[in-house]
Amino acid sequence: MSGGIAAYKAVEVCRRLVDAGAHVSPVLTRAATRFVGELTFSALASEPARTSLWGNDEPIPHTRLGQGADLVVVAPATARLIGAYAAGISSDLLTATLLATRAPVLLAPAMHTEMWEHPAVVDNIATLRRRGVHLVGPDAGRLAGGDLGYGRLAAPEAIVDAATALLAPSRNDTRGLQALVTAGGTREPIDAVRYIGNRSSGKQGHAIASELASRGADVLLVTASELPGPPGVEVERVETAAEMHAAVTRAAAERDLVVMSAAVADFRPKVTVAGKLKKADGVPEVILEQTPDILAELGATRRPGQILVGFAAEALGPGAQPEERLREFAEGKLRAKRADLIVANDVSAPGVGFAHDTNAVLIVTADGYHVPVPLADKGAIAAAVVDAALAYGSRRSSPPGR
Ligand code: CTP
């Protein structure tokens, strides 16, 4: 709990978590104790409330709390707490615990609308989200002092539901699987400052790596995106198609599943000019050459049993029967690259593909299945891709009729 008027609702959150079977260790900032009594939490929770790094019966309470937790819930999370956490400043037991944990963190912000909308808070929230911190609320409604607006603490049951979802046991159905995922768009240098790139953000590939890791797989992510690596995933950063080719070639043989979701450049400048091309020297002629097709190479050389998933980004535009055309393109790529699955999307459709948080795909498989996945966030699409790859693998290892 950090110090806001909504701290009184944390009593209800604590009680509900204990009722749901959680072991709850309450930590209050000093300001929180001005709104709600430490004794209330000591009485309701699974152990006495703590309010300070000092004067405890243990010398370093934040590491025990941080390392021992399966989930850290901050409700309410004030603008100050959010700012300190985003900046990595540990000035009290709560912020020290947040920095000392590798468990998922769920923040339930509560503050006045003006504060919630302040650019500093907006930036801090964006930073924390990027690092994988989870948020619940805030809601719109009545605020302290009778004001109405955004910034009200989420309802206690919503906070507990969000906490429960984060603690739900993972399916573990990819445990022991060695996976390689590629993501992002490669950049092919023209000179020391310019490159040819594409609009891939890497979000879909990072979501697939994250999904595989959360379900138990051992994941190497080779990424050309600047997004942070998902928790539990080994990350190798590359920039060009050549670097991606080298990294994938090194790692692929060992892997049971390879997902090529990167948008690898098809063409690159034949020569990279050292230094910077100057305007005064006139309009340069950039000669392109083809890059190696990594997926096709993997398809031609892979070991038996390895599952190979490719992507097909198509821009169908307006026209009749987009689903059929998308399927034809996907099946063409499936054959040409000898992949097992192709995940195709029409990046010209609204909400689909590059830089969006949502996607809609059609998954086609080498044994003739078509799985359309309607518009959903990229996490849900990632789950559908992993499901389809696992289902394909089990069909292949036990064909019907045998
Ligand atoms: N791919 C690859 N190496 C390349 C280009 C693409 O491994 N040099 C992979 C991508 O990671 C993706 C798949 O191939 O999994 C499809 O890429 P895409 O560019 O859509 O297909 P292309 O075969 O290049 O066909 P086209 O550009 O003509 O649509």
Image (cartoon, grey):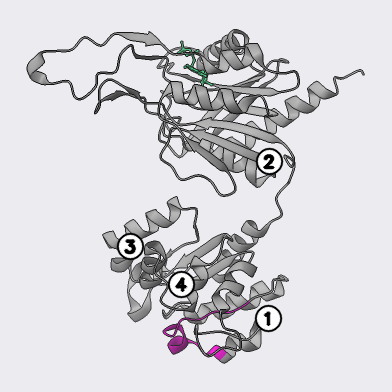
Q: Which residue is mark 2?
A: 217
Q: Main secondary structure of the magenta part?
A: loop
* Mark 3 in CB contact with mark 1 (< 8 angstroms): no
Q: Which residue is mark 4?
A: 95
Choose between 254 and 103: the one closer to the eye.
254
Separation of residues labelled 1 and 2 (CA atoms): 34 Å
Q: Which residue is mark 1?
A: 46
* Mark 4 or mark 1, earlier in chain: 1
* Mark 4 in CB contact with mark 3 (< 8 angstroms): no
Query: Label 2 is placed on what type of residue?
Result: Ala
Is residue 66 shown above or below 181? below
Choose between 321 and 330: the one closer to the eye.
330
- Quadrant for residue 26, please give it: bottom right
Residue 212 appears anywhere in the view: yes
Separation of residues labelled 4 and 3 (CA atoms): 17 Å
Residue 314 placement (x, y as % from top left) = 46, 18
Range of residues picked out in magenta: 25-38
Is residue 80 shown above or below 361? below
